[in-house]
Image (cartoon, rainbow, N blue to C red):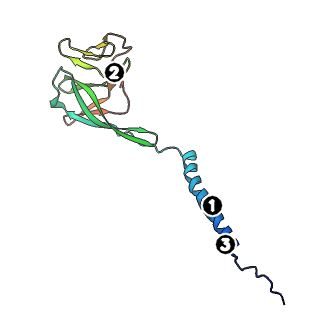
Amino acid sequence: MQRSPVASETTRRSFYTGFIYAAWSVFSAALAVPAALYLFLPPTNRKDPGWIDVTDLDSIPSGAPTEVSFQRKRVDGWKVTSEKTTAWIVKEAEDQVVAYSPQCTHLGCAYHWEDQTHTFVCPCHSSEFSINGDVLSGPAPRPLDRYPVKIEARRIKIGTSDLNA
């Protein structure tokens, strides 16, 4: 009498074949899920922190530009970068200040304040700016870029959303 093969019996070959297919499916899903999320979901819209507390209003002398440094976060798609940057702050009145971006509007070089001439001077191509940011001479195409500024409880806060506000 011959033995008839039992349909529910698992052979070594069928076990390994099933195992390989299952491992291949898990591996494919592990690669496909992140790729699908990247392709079909937009990056999260991280809100700009808005205002950065920079310095005390009383620490800025009236009528003389002061360079202050501060930390800000920059958001680029999925990447958030914390960077140290500076701003030139000019106190125009007791409760009124202006903050300028530290780059020249010609080629982005860092400029400095000259006490003797009462001007901002860019060392790269000799652009000169007045204390209120206007171009006095040189190849700079426009006035200095301004940060949005507000004063709360005698603290100067600089807006990070956009320049020229």
Q: Which mark is residue 101?
A: none
Q: Residue pushed farthest right? A: 1
Q: Secondary structure at mark 2?
A: loop
Earlier along the polypeptide chain: callout 1 or callout 3?
3
How far across and down, in percent of the image, does residue 139 sit? 37, 11
Closer to the eye: label 1 or 3? 3
* Mark 1 crowd level (few <14, some 14–19, many ≥20, 10 Å Cα): few
Question: For residue 15, which numbered disc appears in the image?
Answer: 3
Residue at 36% over, 22% down: 108
In-front residue for pair 14/161: 14
Instruction: List the single residue furthest toward the bottom.
Output: 1
Quick one: quadrant of the C terminus? top left
Q: 10 Å neighbourhood of mark 3: few (<14), some, or many (≥20)?
A: few
- Quarter occupied by residue 54: top left
Q: Residue at x 61, y 63 (%)?
A: 23
Residue visible at 54% across and 51% down in the picture? 34
Of callouts 1 and 2, the N-terminal one: 1
Image location (x, y in percent) of residue 44 = 47, 45
Seen in the image, is 8 located left or right of residue 133?
right
The residue wearing badge 1 is 25
Q: CA distance from mark 1 to mark 3?
A: 15 Å
Residue at (26% x, 14% y) in the render: 130
Does 2 sit left or right of 123 as displayed? right
Amino acid type of the residue tagged 1 in the rendering: Ser
Mark 2 or mark 3, which is nearer the start of the sequence? 3
Q: Using the image, tell me which numbered label, if any, was put on residue 109.
A: 2
Does 165 sit above or below residue 28?
above
Q: Are discs 3 and 2 less than 8 Å apart at CB?
A: no
